[in-house]
Image (tube, rainbow, N blue to C red):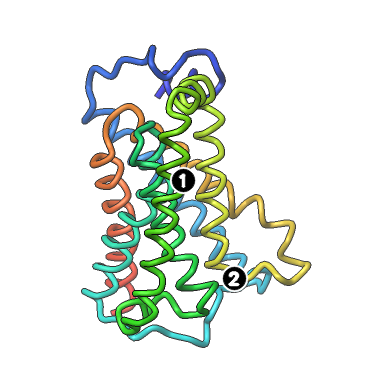
């Protein structure tokens, strides 16, 4: 944990950090993340009750069963978010094209063709169109990466901290879609919403860099499954 803080404040380079007990690091960061997210959820619920922020699409309840909700939100979404947000943090000629092509697939499905994400498996023609866009993005980005391998290798090595902050910020911004911040009264609370997701993004990025991609996926799956499981139990 101390090494993480040193890295974040430029006191220590990521390559200089040696992890002796990976399981201990995983568990400590997981507990820290759960604590931060739990406290933030309590605050968000209070803000909702006061009418200062509103959940998006409150009138569009998705009729998922407990198992389906757990599978989608506790398994599929974490894997998708990690591929988009953190697979590419370790430079590899294929990682960035994969991350951007998956992002292009989801972006085109939701924003270009205007579909609901929960109808993803119900529209085969739309999926095919999005796959074509995704493949095109993969090929274009791969060509750019291959052409600039040396330059990109140096950038990722020299500016990895900035890349981690950028990834964490975009990760937190993506979660804004969960809430409605259109009302002027809710704007002052925007930083309070971004902060816990930004911290979660930083912790996940550190696990990605110092442990492995499988470890960060497991971390995210356990996190989401815990909160979704509690939600299912409390709603029964």
**For this view, does 186 lie left or right of residue 129?**
right
Q: Which mark is residue 5?
A: none
Question: 98 and 181: which one is in front?
Answer: 98
Q: Secondary structure at mark 2?
A: helix
Q: Quarter of the image holding residue 119?
A: bottom left
Q: Secondary structure at mark 1?
A: helix
Q: How far apart are the two marked residues, 1 and 2, measured between alpha carbons?
A: 18 Å
Q: Quarter of the image holding residue 51?
A: bottom right
Image coordinates of residue 187 in percent, x first then y, are: 73, 61
Residue drawn at point x = 30 percent, y = 78 percent = 121
Q: Residues within 10 Å of mark 1 (few under 14, many from 20)?
A: some
> Residue beneath label 2, please?
48
Image coordinates of residue 18 in percent, x first then y, are: 31, 15
**For this view, does 158 lie left or right of residue 230?**
right
Q: Quarter of the image holding residue 130?
A: bottom left
The C terminus lies in which quarter of the figure? Answer: bottom left
Image coordinates of residue 27 in percent, x first then y, are: 27, 36
Vertical position of residue 34 compared to residue 43: above or below: above
**For this view, does 49 lie left or right of residue 154?**
right
The N terminus lies in which quarter of the figure? Answer: top left
Residue drawn at point x = 54 percent, y = 73 percent = 112
Question: 49 and 112: which one is in front?
Answer: 112
> Residue beneath label 1, please?
36
Q: Residues within 10 Å of mark 2 (few under 14, many from 20)?
A: some
Query: Which comes sooner in the sequence, label 1 or label 2?
Result: 1
């Amino acid at each position: 944990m101390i090494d993480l803080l040193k890295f974040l404040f430029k006191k220590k380079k990521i390559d200089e950090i040696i992890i002796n007990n990976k399981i201990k690091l995983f568990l400590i960061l997981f507990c820290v993340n759960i604590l931060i997210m739990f406290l933030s959820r309590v605050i968000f619920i209070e803000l909702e009750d006061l009418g200062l922020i509103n959940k998006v699409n409150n009138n569009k309840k998705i009729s998922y069963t407990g198992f389906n909700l757990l599978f989608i939100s506790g398994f599929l979404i974490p894997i998708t978010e990690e591929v988009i947000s953190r697979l590419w943090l370790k430079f590899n000629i294929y990682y960035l094209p994969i991350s951007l092509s998956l992002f292009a697939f989801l972006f085109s499905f939701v924003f270009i063709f205007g579909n609901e994400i929960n109808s993803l498996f119900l529209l085969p023609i739309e999926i095919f169109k999005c796959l074509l866009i995704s493949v095109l993005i993969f090929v274009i980005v791969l060509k750019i990466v291959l052409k600039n391998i040396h330059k990109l290798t140096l950038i990722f090595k020299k500016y990895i901290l900035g890349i981690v902050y950028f990834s964490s910020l975009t990760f937190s911004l993506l979660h804004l879609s969960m809430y409605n911040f259109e009302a002027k009264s809710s704007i002052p609370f925007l930083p309070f919403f971004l902060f816990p997701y930004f911290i979660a993004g930083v912790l996940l990025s550190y696990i990605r860099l110092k442990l492995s991609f499988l470890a960060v996926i497991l971390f995210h799956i356990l996190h989401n499954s815990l909160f979704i499981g509690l939600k299912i139990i409390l709603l029964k």
